[in-house]
Image (cartoon, grey):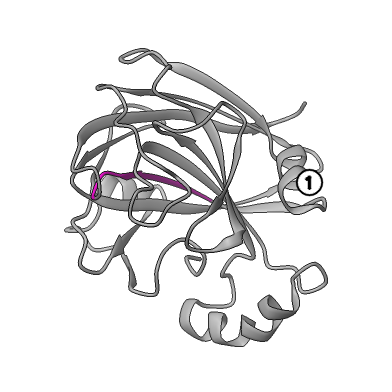
Amino acid sequence: MLALLGQASISVATTDSAIPADLARHGWEAITFDGKRANTFQRCGEDCIAVETETSVSMIGRPVMTDLANMPVLSWEWKIDLPVVPSDLSSKGEDDRAVALYVTFPYDPEKASFSENLMRPVVELARGSDAPGRVISYVWGGFGERGQVVESPYFGGLNAMIVSRTQAAPVGEWVAERFDIIADHERVFGWTPKSAQHILISADSDDTQADNRAYVRKIVFGTR
């Protein structure tokens, strides 16, 4: 499921050393990057995940397969312990963030570009037939304005970031989010998605060498 989420040197691990057993039991997988120190993930209560980042980067993900026609709105709550360190999401090597929530979408050969369709056999050989087609990530970082769309410096138009919170957001307080996934996908990619495929949580501090701790809870798809 990770073909569009990082550089070629990605590892997917479900061993106890990579992810706590209680997260694995709830369907979460650890996604690490070769040569990079991994974040620490743990449960922080019912439907709550804490991620500690310390000059590190990694993520966890699980399948959702949500019918967006009926449940197009994604809501969640999150908070961070320390102020966000400013970074530039649009630049390779400067795109750190305190926390981010990713939504992946199934590959659609009718909507994919010529190059996507051309490379699809290679993607599936490396990552499996369920590798996503497009990705949107909602980012809490020290960059931009709320709602701003930022093209991924690694994957261009295939992986878009939407600024959810910046350094102006409160620290140490739960902040509620609510995004219309269909509307965001239409705005970013130009067509209506039928379903969401995975949810992922990440933090990235390997470039700024910053420390932080974030919490994400109550991730729910619902009606408008």
Q: Which residues are magenta?
A: 199-206
Relative to 92, is 137 above or below? Answer: above
Percent of width and height locating residue 147: 62, 30
Is residue 196 toward the left or the right of residue 126 in the image? right
> How would you classify the magenta stretch by its main secondary structure?
strand
Q: 37 or 19: nearer the eye?
A: 37
Is residue 217 toward the left or the right of residue 187 in the image? left
Res 170 → quadrant: top left
Q: Is residue 201 magenta?
A: yes
Res 86 → quadrant: top left
Relative to 212, is 135 above or below? Answer: below
Relative to 118, is 163 above or below? Answer: above
Percent of width and height locating residue 45: 32, 26
Q: Secondary structure at mark 1?
A: helix
Please rate how many residues cluster around mark 1, counting C-alpha atoms within 10 Å: few if below 14, some from 14 to 19, many from 20.
few
Percent of width and height locating residue 212: 23, 32
Q: 124 or 89: nearer the eye?
A: 89
Q: Is residue 196 magenta?
A: no
Quarter that holds the C terminus? top right
Res 106 → quadrant: bottom right
- Residue type of the residue flagged with mark 1: Glu
Is residue 196 toward the left or the right of residue 159 in the image? right
Task: Tell me the residue at 52%/78% (across/down).
Answer: 128
Task: Tell me the residue at 33%/55% (across/down).
Answer: 93
Residue underneath mark 1: 186
Task: Tell me the residue at 45%/33% (across/down).
Answer: 143
Q: How many numbered marks does the figure carry?
A: 1
Is residue 112 toward the left or the right of residue 5 in the image? right
